Amino acid sequence: MQKIRLFTPGPTMVSPEAMLAMAQPLDHHRTSGFRDTLKDCVELLRYVYRTEATPMVVTGSGTAAMEAAMLGCCKPDGKTLVCHAGKFGERWRDILVRFNLPHVDYEKEYGQGFSPDEVAAKLKEHGDITAVIFVHSETSTATVSDAQGIAKVCRDHNVLCMVDGITSIGAIPFKMDEWGIDVGVTGSQKAMMLPPGLGIVALSDRAWETIDSHQAPAYYNDLKMYRKSMDKWDTPYTPNNQMVSGLKFTLTQIKETGIDNILANTALLAKATRAAVEALGLKVFSDAPVDSVTAVCVPDGVDEAQWRKDLRGMYGIHCAGGQGHIKGKIIRLNHMGYVDAVDTVGAIAALEWTLAKQGYKFEAGAGTGAFGKVIQGT
Amino acid sequence: MQKIRLFTPGPTMVSPEAMLAMAQPLDHHRTSGFRDTLKDCVELLRYVYRTEATPMVVTGSGTAAMEAAMLGCCKPDGKTLVCHAGKFGERWRDILVRFNLPHVDYEKEYGQGFSPDEVAAKLKEHGDITAVIFVHSETSTATVSDAQGIAKVCRDHNVLCMVDGITSIGAIPFKMDEWGIDVGVTGSQKAMMLPPGLGIVALSDRAWETIDSHQAPAYYNDLKMYRKSMDKWDTPYTPNNQMVSGLKFTLTQIKETGIDNILANTALLAKATRAAVEALGLKVFSDAPVDSVTAVCVPDGVDEAQWRKDLRGMYGIHCAGGQGHIKGKIIRLNHMGYVDAVDTVGAIAALEWTLAKQGYKFEAGAGTGAFGKVIQGT
């Protein structure tokens, strides 16, 4: 009977309605029904991405979609600036290494974001860079980078701007066309409010020019094959059509709610959570906290493993821990998608109760009180 | 209110029970619950594959799993014999071409299978072959090849035996260890009775030796990363854990029913369908019909597009058509998974009704009658 409350920054909470939408009788994918559904998803994704491009749906995780974009846009005769300060940025660096793609490795400390000036300096230092990759919202450290500013720098230097938007698109402001972003990638299990299983990638005309200028070392993840099929609202290989139906369902909810309202909700939950963290005498980990997920430093005297075990075991609150060298030092709470103030104040209360259990000192209700003030705007 | 009856050879019918199993509240994938589920799936897949190897579950279609196996086992300093006589065999050839992997292209006519003697002759002709790829059940032509015999030839010549078992594993006899198969690939949407979205690959120790002898040009589809994670019953990237739960559900049903009973049901439906086809004066397309799916030649005077349109529009029977140069010449009926004699006799009846509508002459009930005799064993 214990309720599981997913506060992990992916998978995020999925509504019973979305689950039941995907539990409808399965149909075949080579049908007008599927083509209509895929077409509707593209229209709705254009709304979320704020783009005129054609977002493509890949059966696989966000990593598959990002790999597809990278093999197309990061050419052996080009050079990619890969900015990383966390686990996901490191993954994109690892892909470049694996495929022997020329790159400049730009590493910063975990918890730091990347600024337009820093990227501009790197582009000046390395005159032969053709593409920049960065993580808009680095999920592993809950840190934001200035996507709008970096995109402008990329435009000014005439290099491709490739954005891991896996925990940003649909969660924090992201304006693909207006900002001049060339590649935007996300996954189903974040702001799209679905289980994992689909990756999504949208590409600008500039990105397509690069992709068309060579043959990527890819087959399953070859974006040209996807584009060719998408001309007929089809997919090159058998898609997870059950999840594409789910995607239409949740994207329709997003459209009906209004993307700006959703971004505002996410931002408000993050702001209230940060206030609660501060009121409890805890620290937010990041130098540039993102609104899609909050990383809280584990205070001295508190055992992180026990803390997360109690949160889940006693109260069903499933938070993520740290990754890499910050494992054990932070816990992370999601604000994306199907989560509201009542869910989140419950998580804050459970944080209090489980901290108290370990002897951490604070005024009972300080966290939930501070949280509530932000929510109420008082 | 129209019922959709999926007689396509993938996706096949999915039970409401399986759909609802996947509609259960989503949990996180880095949990003991998910690890237990994945471990159970592996045990159950071992039962279906008849292997001691550790089948691995990839989030993606069967093509992703096959590509992963090929990039690991087909080396740039080796040479792969790729046998193809249909659309899926051609796909594996295309992957070798895309990745510039040395290969011998062994093409036969659509509707023909490959025999052990033929493969042995090719291995003798080309002394430097290191791996053989063939499609056990070529779905596009509904044709079987002798996997047991070809595997023996591969062992005798000390080359890897790589089997596309996407519509064979769990549907027709497949004994990975006993037959000496090195690579066996399948997908969720066939005999596993689930929607599309997962690929499955099992590898012999010999296959792993080859994989370990070089670095495959792969990241998302790098099997070494999967093996490393599987040591902890984990996955390298976010898995579609909702579908892995579904996989445990359907594999448990398969184990409870007994794999031999399932293979017998599939074979009986195929035999009865072939008898019905013959009784209607129609022809089975393949020279070596497989039991997982039956391809029926479209008779003279019958318009295939109209036939399939009527089957679906009037009776909800969704059959597959032909692919490549046999498009318009065949229709295909699935026998895999969650489909029984009553479902199938309904499809045969609808075949009769829609043929009659186009003026095709036969004795009414001849198809269903012949079908019933086989089912009843009379």
Image (cartoon, coloured by chain):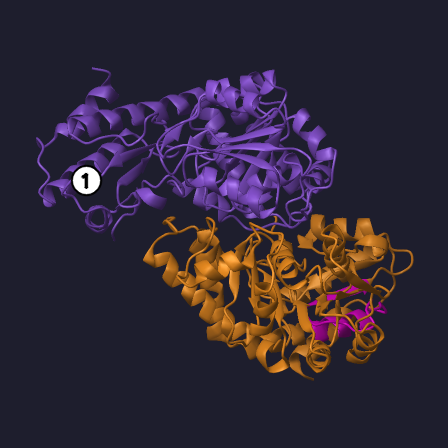
Chain colours: A orange, B purple
Asked if residue A131 is positioned above or below residue B366 in the image, the reply reads: below
Q: Where residue A144 sits: x, y (%)? A: 74, 72
Q: Secondary structure at mark 1?
A: helix
Q: Is residue A114 left or right of residue B113?
A: right
Asked if residue A44 is positioned above or below residue B24 in the image, the reply reads: below
Q: Which residues are magenta?
A: A270-296
Q: Where residue A158 sits: x, y (%)? A: 69, 78
Q: Residues within 10 Å of mark 1 (few under 14, many from 20)?
A: many
Q: Pick the residue in front: A105 or A58.
A: A105
Q: Residue lying farthest front?
A: B125
The answer to whether residue A198 of the structure is visible from this angle is yes
Q: Residue at x 62, y 72 (%)?
A: A182
Q: Where residue B94 sits: x, y (%)? A: 52, 44
Q: Residue lying farthest bottom?
A: A378
Asked if residue B280 is positioned above or below residue B375 in the image, the reply reads: below
Residue at the spot of label 1: B350
Picture quadrant where residue A35 is located: bottom left
Q: Pick the residue in front: A362 or B374.
A: B374
Host chain of mark 1:
B
Picture quadrant where residue A336 is located: bottom right
Q: Is residue B314 left or right of residue B70?
A: left
The kind of residue tagged 1 is Ala
Labels in figure, total: 1
Q: Pick the residue in front: A152 or A171.
A: A152
Q: Where residue A356 sits: x, y (%)? A: 82, 58
Please check the rendered image and state whether residue B241 is part of the magenta-colored stretch, yes or no: no
Q: Looking at the rendering, in which quadrant would you find the C terminus of chain B?
A: top left
Q: Is residue B86 left or right of residue B184?
A: left
Please check the rendered image and state whether residue A281 is part of the magenta-colored stretch, yes or no: yes
